Amino acid sequence: MLLLLEACGTIGFVMTASEQLDLSIYRMGGALALAGSEQLYGVADPASGLVFTYPPFAAVVSSGLTAIGDEPSRIVMILVSLAAVARVAWLVMDYVPRGSWLGRWNRMTLTSWFVAISLISEPYVSSINFGQVNLVLLWAVIEAALSTRPITASVIGIAAGIKLVPVAFIAMLVMQRRLAHAVWAISWFLASVLVGVLVLPGASWCFWTDAVWNDQRIGGIAYVGNQSLNGALWRLSGPGGSLLLWVAMACVIAVVTARITVRSSLLEGVVAVALASLLLSPVSWTHHWVWISIAVLVAFGRGNGPRSRWALVAAGWAVAQLTWIIWWFPHGGDVEYDGSIGMKLAADVYAVLAIATLLGLATTPRGRLLTDDRPVVEGRRAAP
């Protein structure tokens, strides 16, 4: 009943009070793709004033949203996002074994609570409010990365064709020596690039040679909504940030993530790559951080119970996403450069917690709450 009320409330809010600006951008890109226009990266969306920043394949996919109209596309995006959240919850709760303190509840109950709590968290609400595709991409990566069937990794390649960040998960597959998975993912990513070239050759040339390298097209780097390492350093150091410090920290993050990827459970490896990608991307808006809910579960798993030090990390993630704390501080108009170091670090809570989680996963023993040491049944681990 709680989930039904939340779902109805989400649909009602988005349909009546939300402008879903990013969905408007998707639909603009879809309209240009349907028209065969090569101006995909040269015009701004009239509704939001923002430009299309995704690969050409994303515009081709978005043409379906354009074709069905404004209101139907809003409903479709909401329903697909809610379905993605439910599926993700069901998949990750398969990693909670019976006999653990959390395993006292059955999988359906845990799934219901995961969905209910996630749907009031800042990243999930923001993603649905903007009409973003992040929750669908979250499902795609989780579905494929946790499966033993190589062909399912094709979904990661398709996701990377829509937004480039999932390319990092292809690198994860290679590091884990899941080469058949990697081949499927790479093949479908290249196929998505080819589709973009065939449908929009001029726009494809513009994207891969210019737009993809221009981070100024994405938005204000220093805005508090950008919780990447780059954004945090801009706010701490001033305009331009600190390239030397960013490179040094990026190298550490890359090495730590590689270590986690090859030594930890599949779920921990996926979360580590997600957090590292969010940190190292030039811009990671809060609605990109939909991985936080799974990070909470991973943190609890490393701690083996609610009284461990890892429980503090889990609690930090929970508080950060449920209180919307980053928006408590002044933001907009470059006021992010003002204030004390402590206030800036508090406003950078997603980045700070992500770094703490990665360092913790790399340096502490594997927990007993989460496990993937069970036999495989029909391409996925057997239920506990």
Image (tube, rainbow, N blue to C red):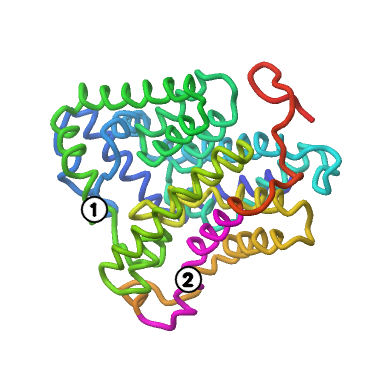
Q: Which residue is denoted by mark 2 in the rendering? A: 347
Q: Main secondary structure of the magenta part?
A: helix
Between residues 85 and 208, which one lies in front from this camera angle?
A: 208
Cα separation, mark 2 vs mark 1, equals 23 Å
Q: Residue at x 72, y 31 (%)?
A: 373
In the depicted structure, whether residue 371 falls above or below residue 220: above
- The disc placed on residue 294 is none
Q: Amino acid at mark 2?
A: Ala
Question: Which image quarter holds the C terminus?
Answer: top right
Q: Quadrant of the rendered structure where residue 196 is?
A: top left
Between residues 38 and 63, which one lies in front from this camera angle?
A: 38
Q: Amino acid at mark 1?
A: Arg
Residue 374 left/right relative to 154: right
The mark that comes first in sequence, 2 or 1, is: 1
Residue 49 left/right relative to 223: left
Residue 185 percent location from the top left of the image: 42, 25
Residue 351 left/right relative to 251: right
Can the viewer see residue 119?
Answer: no
Q: Quadrant of the rendered structure where residue 284 is?
A: bottom left
Q: Which residue is denoted by mark 1 in the rendering? A: 217
Q: Badge 2 local density, few (<14 within 10 Å), some, or many (20+)?
A: many
SS at circle 2? helix
Residue 158 percent location from the top left of the image: 40, 28
Question: Which image quarter holds the N terminus?
Answer: top right
Between residues 2 and 169, which one lies in front from this camera angle?
A: 169
Q: Badge 1 local density, few (<14 within 10 Å), some, or many (20+)?
A: some
Can the viewer see residue 224?
Answer: yes
Q: Residue at x 23, y 53 (%)?
A: 217
The range drawn in magenta is 338-360
Residue 278 percent location from the top left of the image: 44, 51
- Find out whether residue 339 is within the magenta segment: yes
